[in-house]
Amino acid sequence: MKTTAKVLLVGVVVLTSGVGVGAQGVPAGDPAVAVPVSGKVAIVNQGRANTQLVTILYIAGASTTQQYDVDVTLPVLGVSLQGEASVQMSSRATGVVAVADAHATGQARSVSLHGAAGDTTVSLNVDQPMHGFGSYDPAEATIHIRGTGGTGMFDGINIAGELKGFFRPTGTLYLSYPSTGAALSAVERGLAQNAALTAAQRLEALEQAKQALAQAKPATFPPDDATQAIVTSTIQRAGTQVQVVLRIVVPAGDARQMVKVVAVEPNGLARTVYQGSHAPGEAVSALATGTPPFVVQVYVAGTLAKQITAPVQ
C-alpha cells in the first residue's frame, strides 16, 4: 500500500552500512552463519517536520527533516532483541517539471539491543524510495544493519544484514560465528550468564535457538556495501547570507575519488566551492556560502551524490 503525505511519516531506519558501530574491524570474507530474520519497527513518537519548498531556475525541490523515536524488535537465533532509537529522517525530491529524484534516508548510529542471551550495539540506516513529492511505500524501504561485539552470545561477534520493509523488516542476518555449533554454544553461554532466567526458561530459549539454526546456512561475512556517498548537511543563516555546511563520507570504490561541491546561483552561474581527491571511508567537510536562493550540488567520482537547496527564509 502506498502512502501520500506532506511529510515522510514513515522514516527510514537504515540500519546504515559503513558508518557508526560496525564500520571498522568487520571480517569480510570470514566464515559466518546466515540466518533468516523477521523483525518489527514501531514509531512511538515523531517530532515536528521542517519542510522547505523551493523553485530555482528549472529545478523544483522539496526537503523535509524530522526526528522519530522508534522501538525495534529483532529476533536473532530465536532470541528476541529489543531496543529504542532516535532517528533523524531526511527526505528530498527534485525535478524539472516532473519529479526526477525522490528519496528519503534515515540514520541511527548507535542502537543498543537487549536480549535474554546478551546485548549488542548496531548502526541502523533506512533507504526509502519515494514516488513524487510525498508518496512512498514502506514495504520498499531497505534497512541495513551493522554491529560489532557485545555481551553474552554477541561477545566478539560481528553482525551485518540487509532487510526489506520498514514496519516488518525481513531478510538475512550474517553473524560471524564459524559454524552453527559455535553459534549454539554462544547462545547457551549467554543464557547461562543471565541470572534472571530460570532453568526452564533457559531450556526453552535454547530450543528456540536450535529451531532457528535449523534454517541457518554457512556463509561468508559480507563486505561493507557502502558504494554510495553519505552526505549530511545543515543550513545556517547569518543576516542575508546562508551557509550550507556539508559532511561527505567517501564510499567504497577506487583508491582515490574526486569530491566536488558546486553552488548554483539563481542566475544560473555555477561556482566550485570545493574540490579534492579522497580515499574511501574518508570524511570530507565543505562549506558553501551565498545569498539565497541557491542550489548546492555534491559530486563524488563524477556522479551527483546529493543536491541541497538553500531557500529564502
Image (cartoon, helix red, strand yellow):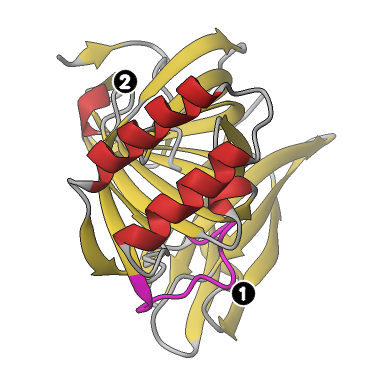
The residue at the point 41 percent across, 68 percent down is: 224
Q: Is residue 312 left or right of residue 221?
A: right
Amino acid found under the numbered disc labelled 2 = Gly
Q: Secondary structure at mark 2?
A: loop
What secondary structure is the magenta-colored segment mainly? loop
Density class for disc 2 (Cα within 10 Å; few <14, some 14-19, many ≥20) is: many
x, y percentage for residue 94? 34, 38
Q: Residue at x 36, y 41 (%)?
A: 77
- Per the image, label 1 sits on a secondary structure element best described as loop
Q: Residue 5's x, y, as percent?
A: 33, 10
The residue pinned by badge 1 equals 282
- Residue 252, how many percent across, how many down? 42, 75
Closer to the eye: label 1 or 2: 1
**Dot 1 crowding, Cα within 10 Å, few <14, some 14–19, many 20+:** few
Specify which label sits upstream in the sequence, 1 or 2: 2
Region rendered in magenta: 16-31
Instruction: Point out residue 275 in the picture as x, y percentages from the top left corner.
Output: 59, 78
Q: Which residue is mark 2?
A: 134
Left or right: 204 with respect to 191? left
Taking the magenta stretch, the answer to whether it contains residue 254 is no
- Residues 285 and 212: in front is 212
In the image, is residue 125 above or below residue 1? below
Image quarter for residue 234?
top right
Q: Nearer the viewer, residue 142 or 97?
A: 142
